[in-house]
Image (cartoon, helix red, strand yellow):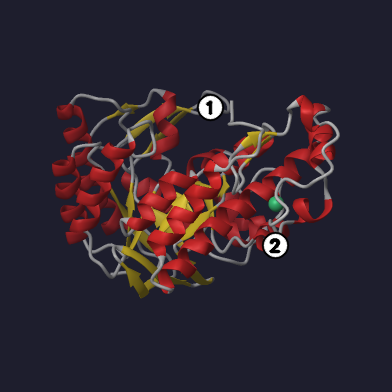
Amino acid sequence: MSEAVSFRVEHQDGAARAGVLATPHGAVPTPAFMPVGTRGTVRALDTRDLAEVGARIVLANTYHLMLRPGAETVAALGGLHGFMAWEGPILTDSGGYQVLSLEPRVDEDGVAFRSAYDGARVRLTPEGAVAVQEQLGPDIAMILDVPVALPAPADRVRRAMERTLRWAERARAAHTRTDQALFGIVQGGTDPEMRAESAAATAALGFAGFGIGGLAVGETPEERHQALEAAVAALPPGRVRYVMGLGDTEGVLAAVGQGCDLFDCVWPTRLARHGKVLSARGDYSVRRAELAEAGEPIDSDCPCLTCRRYSLGYLRHLRVTGELLGMRLLSIHNLTYTLGLLDGARRAVAAGKYAAYCESVRARRRTRHSRGRLP
Ligand SMILES: [Zn+2]
């Protein structure tokens, strides 16, 4: 069993928990959100920005980095920490999810697809995904899971879930780095029974932590609730639980309330690059014409650089003219908002007031600006 990371629950409030995930590159208070640095960079931000917005752990994508610049090159430049100049904890996904959009051919041995960069044939196996991540050198690596696009027939979801279990075993046998943890991934679509079965069998393999994959892909909140409930009940209480790809306000609040600890999502930064801001009083686009002369910040209570220094009118101007600074400033704000949401959740759990916290966040979001909803 890997000793590279450990997890300690410090407070519990209902099912919600506040804990600390200890890694070789520092401790992460949970619940926590991981900004997504797809190609070894959270787009438009440098790692000093990330530290300033309060990020404690960053995610990078194995699939992209193995193709460009290649895992050997990253290793030669000091591994991911040296490569991207980030001294804090890093988690890499295994590539399964990205491969999904490339119409992969999946067989028992692994998955074959064409590189989105140059069309070259690439093959990824459970062992190969581990080897690549050992070269990349994150604190936490993920097993390769079997991609399945939802909705899918139950028998296809079951075959993918069972194959993921066999791949989890192979990944575990192949993993050798003692300064890196390997996490298993729970699959099973939206079927609670399959989720429970997958979680119990993955837990039995003894991973240091557990991803819950294949959610936040368009299922209803109720379907997600049931899938998470079944998975969480079958996972060991002393290990960290990571809902992969989830990062919207409502989704995160609900999942924390169910006992999940770790989240990642491209949306806060992707929306920022499209001129959309997340805020405590609702999400909206800065492109709107009536903001042209708005002198106030996005959110006068927000501590971020963008809200301390810049007016909505200026941010609108940057967006309308396509200036790069606009992407950076909105990314800084949206990450500050999302990380602050999780920070608040952690404090509320510690104080035994998590339900009241969720209610106050929701109430504030209902008293929207007159700017309306995201289009
Ligand atoms: Zn702000």
Q: Which residue is mark 1?
A: 116
Q: Is residue 188 above or below residue 170?
A: above
Amino acid carrying label 1: it is: Ala
Q: Residue at x 44, y 25 (%)?
A: 102
Q: Residue at x 26, y 43 (%)?
A: 187
- In the visual, does 374 lie left or right of 115? right
Amino acid carrying label 2: it is: Glu
Between 239 and 272, the residue placed more toward the observer is 272
- In the visual, does 242 lie left or right of 316? left
Q: Residue at x 78, y 25 (%)?
A: 289
Between 200 and 123, the residue placed more toward the observer is 200
Residue 225 in which image quadrant = top left
Give coordinates of residue 369: x percent, y percent. 65, 39
Viewer can see residue 77: no
The yes-or-no answer for disc 2 within 8 Å of ligand 1 is no
Disc 1 on helix, strand or loop?
A: loop
Crowd band around label 1 with a 10 angstrom C-alpha radius: few (<14), some (14–19), many (20+): few
Viewer can see residue 101: yes
Q: Which residue is mark 2?
A: 52
Q: Residue at x 48, y 43 (%)?
A: 248
Between 227 and 203, the residue placed more toward the observer is 227
Give coordinates of residue 198: x percent, y percent. 19, 48
